[in-house]
Image (cartoon, rainbow, N blue to C red):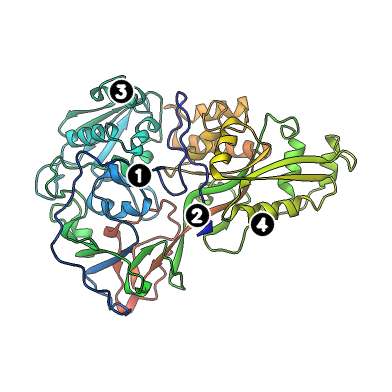
C-alpha cells in the first residue's frame, strides 16, 4: 500500500562508518545470500490440500492460528522482512525479551550488571535447555553471534550498532572473529565489552539478530516457548516446548503458521499482521517509526530560528495527513508518542508575517524554499498539503522537487536540500534511539544541526554516576531544547494493523515494539469475551 513507502532508517550510528539506509519496517535492503549453516526442519512429503471455501474458524482453546504472507525462514541470517521474525521468536529466545507493554524483561539471562556501562556481565539461568533437552550455555550465544557477523546477512551490521568492541574491524575482516567483544566467562556468565558507554544496552538486546541458534543443522532445535512439530511448504505447526524455562505459563498447546490463500478470509485466522483485508476486528499498534520534514541548518535562510518557527507554526498535522488508521498525527516532536514526555499541544496560529519580517522577508522579497520529497506513494499527497498550507501566506513560495527515493537518499546524504522529507525507525524502545540523531557528530545528522548544550546533555546521559530518574530528567531537557529549536517539522507516527480474532487476549494496544509472542496470547472464555484487551 502507498502508506508503506520507505523512509530514512539506519542500522548503524557509529562515528567511523557511512550510514546504511533500509526500507521502512525492514532491517535490510536486499535478499541475503544463502547461509552456509542454514537450519531447515524436515519438510513433509504431503502435498498441500486444495484451498477450501472460506469459512469462519471455530475457536480452538488449544490452537493459535497465525496467517502469514511471507516465506518461512529458519536461519536468522536469512530474514528479509519483519513479518518473518514472529516464527523464530516463538522458537528462539534471547538474553532479554519484551513484556506485553514493550518493556525489556529477563529471558535467557536472569540478571545483568555493569560498573561502567562498557563491560557488561549477563548471568544465564542455570536450567536453560534446548528443545532436545541439551543444556543451553553462554558459549552458545558466543558461537551464534560470531556466526552471524561472519555471514553475508545485512543484520550483522547490528553488532557495530551495539558498540560491541572490535565489531567494525571484524566486519571489515581486519581482526579475527574471536576478538569480537563477546566471551563466555564460564557456562553461565556472558561478558559483553563495548567501545563506548551504553547504559541502555539491555534494551538493545531484544533484536532478532541476537537470538541464539543451535549448532546442529539436520533439524530445527530452539530454546523458545515452542518447538517444530510439522512443516510443509504452506504451513508450519508448532507445539509447546517441554524444556522451555516458563512452559507452565504458555497457554496455547500448538501454534499454526499458515500461508494465506487468495480465497481465505481474515476470520479463518486468529492473528494476521498487516492484513490485506482490514475490518472492524483489525487493531492498530503504534510503531517506533515517525515521519517528518528536516530543515537544513547550513542554509542561510533555514538556520534562522524565526523562519523555522514560522513554517512549523503554520502546520497542523491533523489537517495534513490523509484519513488513515495506519497514520497517527504527531505534532509535539519527532519521537513516537510513547517516548514523549508532554501531551500533544493544541495547534494555535502564530503571527507568521511578523516572524518572517524579522528576517527581512516581504512580499517583494518572499521566502523561496526548495522542498524535496519522494515522487511516489503517500509522499506527494503530504507535500501538496504542506505547500497549500504554506502558500496561504503571500510571503512564502515553495519550489517542488519530487524525486525517486534513491535520489532523495543521495541528496540527504550530501546535504543537498533545504527542506526534505525524512523520518526514522528505531531498533529499540528507548529515547536515545531517536535523541542520538541530534548530536552534532552523529553520522545520521544530515541537517547540520549543532548545539553544544544539547551535545553536552546527550553525553551526560551515558554517565554511570546518574540514576534512571536523573537520566529521564536529562531526556526532558534535550526534548525541550529540540522543541524550542524547531529542528524538524513532525507530522505522524506509523501504526501497524493486525487482524485479531475477538476471542484472543494477552496483547496490549499501546505496545510500540511490533513484537507480540505467541506464548503471551490466550483464548478468552465465553464469559470474558467482552473484556477490553487494550487496557
Q: Is residue 502 visible?
A: no
355, above or below 61, in the image: above
* Residue position for label 1: 31
Corner quadrant of residue 488:
top right
**Crowd around label 1: few <14 · some 14–19 · many ≥20 (10 Å):** some
For discs 2 and 1, the disc positioned in front in the rendered view: 1
Whichever of callouts 4 and 1 sits on the residue coming sooner in the sequence is: 1
Task: Categorize mark 2 by other alpha carbons within 10 Å: few (<14), some (14-19), many (20+).
Answer: few
Residue 4, disc: 2
The residue to which callout 4 is attached is 320
479 sits to left or right of 312: left
Residue lying at 37% horizontally and 39% vertically, measured from the top left: 204
Return the disc, 2 or 3, that comes first in the chain's sequence.
2
Relative placement, left or right, of 449 versus 194 is: right
Quarter containing the C terminus: bottom left
Mark 3 lies on residue: 173
Amino acid at each position: 500500500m502507498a502508506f508503506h513507502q520507505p523512509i530514512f532508517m539506519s542500522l548503524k550510528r557509529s562515528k567511523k562508518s557511512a550510514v546504511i539506509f533500509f526500507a521502512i519496517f525492514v532491517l535490510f535492503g536486499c535478499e541475503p545470500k544463502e547461509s552456509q549453516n542454514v537450519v531447515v526442519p524436515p519438510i513433509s512429503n504431503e502435498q498441500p490440500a486444495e484451498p477450501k471455501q472460506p469459512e469462519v474458524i471455530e475457536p480452538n482453546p488449544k490452537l493459535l492460528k497465525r496467517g502469514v504472507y511471507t516465506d518461512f525462514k529458519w536461519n536468522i541470517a536469512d530474514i528479509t522482512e519483519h513479518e518473518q521474525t514472529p516464527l523464530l521468536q516463538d522458537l528462539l529466545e534471547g538474553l532479554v525479551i519484551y513484556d506485553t507493554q514493550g518493556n525489556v524483561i529477563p529471558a535467557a539471562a536472569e540478571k545483568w550488571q555493569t560498573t561502567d556501562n562498557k563491560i557488561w556481565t549477563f548471568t544465564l539461568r542455570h536450567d536453560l535447555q534446548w528443545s532436545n533437552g541439551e543444556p543451553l550455555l553462554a558459549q552458545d550465544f558466543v558461537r551464534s553471534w560470531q556466526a552471524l557477523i561472519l555471514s553475508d546477512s545485512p543484520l550483522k551490521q547490528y553488532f557495530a550498532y551495539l558498540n560491541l568492541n572490535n565489531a567494525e574491524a571484524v566486519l571489515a575482516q581486519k581482526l579475527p572473529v574471536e576478538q569480537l567483544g563477546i566471551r563466555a566467562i564460564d557456562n553461565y556468565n556472558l561478558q559483553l565489552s563495548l567501545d563506548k558507554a551504553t547504559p541502555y544496552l539491555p534494551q538493545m538486546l531484544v533484536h532478532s539478530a541476537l537470538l541464539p541458534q543451535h549448532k546442529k543443522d539436520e533439524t530445527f532445535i530452539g530454546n523458545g516457548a515452542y518447538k517444530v512439530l510439522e512443516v510443509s511448504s504452506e504451513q508450519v505447526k508448532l507445539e509447546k516446548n517441554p524444556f522451555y524455562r516458563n512452559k507452565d505459563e504458555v497457554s496455547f498447546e500448538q501454534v499454526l503458521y499458515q500461508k494465506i490463500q487468495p480465497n481465505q478470509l481474515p476470520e479463518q485466522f486468529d492473528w494476521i499482521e498487516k492484513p490485506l483485508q482490514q475490518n472492524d476486528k483489525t487493531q492498530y499498534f503504534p510503531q517506533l517509526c515517525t515521519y517528518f520534514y528536516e530543515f537544513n541548518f547550513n542554509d542561510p535562510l533555514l538556520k534562522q530560528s524565526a523562519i523555522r518557527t514560522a513554517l512549523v507554526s503554520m502546520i497542523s498535522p491533523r489537517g495534513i495527513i490523509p484519513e488513515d488508521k495506519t497514520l497517527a498525527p504527531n505534532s509535539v516532536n519527532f519521537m513516537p508518542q510513547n517516548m514523549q514526555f508532554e501531551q500533544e499541544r493544541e495547534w494555535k496560529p502564530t503571527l507568521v508575517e511578523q516572524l518572517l519580517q524579522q528576517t527581512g522577508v516581504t512580499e517583494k522579497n518572499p521566502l523561496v524554499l526548495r522542498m524535496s520529497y519522494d515522487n511516489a506513494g503517500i509522499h506527494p499527497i503530504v507535500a501538496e498539503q504542506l505547500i497549500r498550507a504554506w502558500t496561504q501566506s503571500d510571503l512564502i513560495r515553495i519550489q517542488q522537487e519530487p524525486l525517486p527515493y534513491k535520489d532523495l537518499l543521495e541528496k540527504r546524504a550530501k546535504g543537498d536540500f533545504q527542506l526534505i522529507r525524512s523520518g526514522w525507525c528505531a531498533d529499540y524502545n528507548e529515547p536515545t534511539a531517536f535523541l542520538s540523531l541530534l548530536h552534532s557528530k552523529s553520522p545520521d545528522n544530515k541537517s547540520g544541526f549543532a548545539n553544544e548544550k544539547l551535545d553536552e546533555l546527550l553525553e551526560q546521559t551515558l554517565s554511570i554516576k546518574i540514576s534512571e530518574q536523573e537520566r529521564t530528567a536529562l531526556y526532558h531537557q534535550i526534548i525541550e531544547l529540540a522543541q524550542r529549536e524547531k529542528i524538524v517539522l513532525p507530522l505522524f507516527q506509523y501504526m501497524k494493523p493486525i487482524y485479531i480474532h475477538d476471542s484472543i487476549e494477552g496483547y496490549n494496544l499501546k505496545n510500540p515494539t511490533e513484537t507480540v509472542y505467541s506464548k503471551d496470547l490466550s483464548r478468552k472464555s465465553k464469559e470474558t469475551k467482552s473484556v477490553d484487551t487494550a487496557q
